[in-house]
């Protein structure tokens, strides 16, 4: 299948340059390469002092489940740890399994594992053969499709036309408000005030988007 190309306004993320140099030379397994790039992407979605992913979050990731196979995900993750690309440790308060990039930040984080408390309620993702357009658009422009986000999108599909949801995602990108709460507010506003010719009605300033 030919990729359709990168859409306008698509996000870019920083990737350590050795990934495209010496590390790329060492990796000879496609699954490991996929896993390495995806874990970097997942970690980059985090902000502040939470630049890590848990085992539950990894298992709930659609891309990893579909591209590697659900039963092969954690085995491949362990391969990246064995190579030294990522660090694995457990938070001492709740014994949560944590993975982070083997960087100066990641090594410091591992040293403070006794103080890390993780709110981890991610559920495993059940693989699907394909991702509908709205879901793909969300993942390309907003963030990870977790089971919770998938449920919210399904609920929106029962309330609004797919075209509205797609356009609300595009509006969130245009206004740099990349979150489901913003998208949901846009949809609610269009439903309340009306939508003409596929375009939102004029904003009077009375509604504040989250």
Image (cartoon, grey):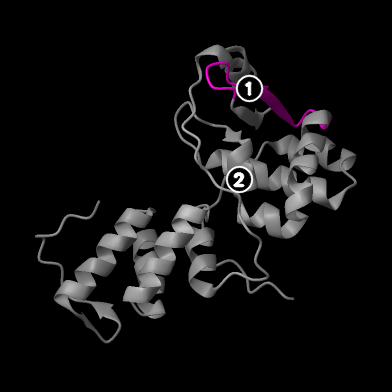
Identify the residue position indicated by label 1 in the image: 90
From the viewer's perspective, is residue 6 above or below residue 16?
A: below
Q: Return the x and y of residue 208 as percentages of the image width and height.
A: 17, 55
Residue under the image location 67 percent in, 22 percent down: 89
Instruction: Assess disc 1: are there few (<14), some (14-19) or many (≥20) residues with their C-alpha within 10 Å of its C-alpha.
Output: some
Find the distance from the CA under tag 1 to the CA under tag 2: 21 Å
User: What segment carries the magenta color?
Assistant: 83-95
- Identify which residue is drawn at 63% across, 29% down: 97
Badge 1 vs badge 2, beta-carbon distance below 8 Å: no
Magenta segment includes 92: yes
Quarter placement of the N terminus: bottom right
Of discs 1 and 2, which sits in the foreground? Answer: 1
Residue 208 within the segment the image draws in magenta: no
Of 126 and 80, the residue lying toward us: 126
Quadrant of res 171: bottom left
Mark 2 secondary-structure assignment:
helix
Which badge, 1 or 2, comes first in the chain's sequence? 2
Q: SS of the residue at dot 1?
A: strand
Residue at 81% x, 45% y is 32
Q: Does 164 sit above or below residue 86?
A: below
Front residue of this view, candidates 176 and 185: 185
Numbered mark located on residue 41 in the image: 2
Question: In x, y percent, where is residue 13?
Answer: 57, 46
């Amino acid at each position: 299948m030919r990729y359709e190309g990168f859409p306008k306004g698509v996000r870019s993320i920083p990737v350590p340059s050795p990934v495209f140099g010496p590390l790329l030379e060492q990796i000879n397994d496609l699954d490991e390469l996929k896993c390495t790039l995806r874990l970097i992407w997942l970690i980059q979605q985090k902000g502040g002092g939470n630049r890590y992913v848990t085992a539950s979050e990894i298992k709930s990731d659609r891309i990893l489940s579909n591209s590697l196979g659900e039963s092969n995900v954690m085995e491949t993750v362990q391969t990246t740890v064995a190579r030294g690309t990522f660090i694995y440790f457990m938070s001492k308060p709740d014994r949560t399994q944590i993975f982070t990039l083997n960087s100066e930040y990641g090594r410091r984080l591992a040293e403070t594992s006794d103080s890390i408390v993780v709110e981890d309620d991610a559920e495993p993702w059940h693989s699907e053969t394909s991702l509908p357009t709205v879901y793909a658009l969300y993942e390309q422009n907003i963030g990870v499709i977790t089971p919770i986000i998938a449920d919210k999108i399904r609920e929106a599909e029962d309330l609004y036309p797919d075209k509205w949801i797609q356009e609300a995602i595009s509006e969130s990108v245009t206004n740099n408000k990349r979150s489901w709460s913003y998208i949901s507010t846009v949809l609610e506003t269009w439903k309340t005030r009306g939508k003409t010719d596929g375009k939102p009605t004029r904003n009077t300033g009375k509604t504040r988007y989250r």
